[in-house]
Image (cartoon, rainbow, N blue to C red):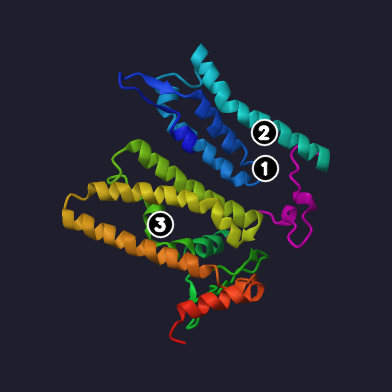
Amino acid sequence: MYFWLSSGGIEEGGRPYLKIGRLFLGSLCMAFVAPCRPQLLLGSFFSILLFWEFIFQKRMLFAWNKKGMLATFCFLSPYFVTAFWLMYYNYARFGSVFDFGANYNLTGNAMIYRGFHLDRIPLALFSYLFVPTGFTNRFPFVAPSTMSSSYQGVSTVECLIGGLMYNHVFLIPGLMVWKMGGWIKNKKAYFFALSACLSAIVIIITDAQMAGVLNRYFGDFAWLLMIAAFLSLLGMYDGLADKKARYFFCLVFFCSFVHSMAYQLLGIFTDVGVTLEVNNGLMFYRISHLVEFWL
């Protein structure tokens, strides 16, 4: 994303430029995501918003001219090359270019038989975003959330340490980005934030249907909600004219950020199946005694 953002701009004389080297590197990084986390390929569609002016107004990308065709080749070639080698690998190992190995995942979650059930969606959205964190009176003071529901089907659900919005309050504006049209004055930034929010919801639903509610899948969509949240927060800050209001806004954001960092730190020591207290008891109790100094 950084390479894409830094690949285009306007020179001092007012002439637009597009650095095809950085354009190529951005596409290469996004294409390399496919073999490990295919869900993150949704981020590639952000390129339409990022290069909207270069595609539809300045005709420097996806255009039938020499520079446009060269830029288009640099933009698309990493995807085609990566797809070719990935499909070749799938064919050599599994006998099909579209088989990524899901048919052979028989260790406890046969993904090909999960199907798509609407009943899983509310549980996934609540668990990933809003489920409250458990608390305890001893280090590390946070405990796994109570994961229970009336869903009568089969779904893989791990113990989570709270939902994303519950433990990262400053991300809430990212989930309400459709209400931020009056705050985010830049329409390109607004649609970018809206696309990030919708992409996150799509990934949550996809992960829940394909695999379940698992701790490691927060990494699939959390970064998208962070993009939406920070664009919304910047728009809200710019829209506050009063100095005291801006100070209060920054204070609330700082407090929520400190709360989130404390949660992340304490979450390292929380027992969610693999516990540091068992695997490295010396480190756990040293840190525990430093924190609980009154014992």
Task: Tell me residue 67's x, y (percent).
Answer: 49, 15
Q: Is residue 135 visible?
A: no
Q: Which mark is residue 171?
A: 3
Which residue lies at the image location 34% right of the left edge and 22% below the top edge?
11
Give the structural element (helix, strand or loop) at label 3: helix
Cβ atoms at labels 1 and 2 below 8 Å apart: yes
Q: What's drawn in magenta, residue-wise?
A: 95-120
Reading the image, the residue beneath label 1 is 35
Q: Earlier in the sequence, mark 3 or mark 1?
A: 1
Which residue lies at the image location 80% right of the left edge and 52% below the top edge?
104
Q: Which mark is residue 82?
A: 2
Task: Tell me residue 200's x, y (percent).
Answer: 50, 50
Distance between mark 1 and mark 2 Cα atoms: 9 Å
- Horizontal side of residue 5 vs 90, given as left or right: left
- Horizontal side of residue 294 vs 124, given as left or right: left
Q: Is residue 9 above or below residue 106?
A: above
Discs 2/3, front: 2
The image quarter in which residue 252 lies? bottom left
Give the structural element (helix, strand or loop) at label 1: loop
Give the structural element (helix, strand or loop) at label 2: helix
Q: Residues within 10 Å of mark 2 (few under 14, many from 20)?
A: some
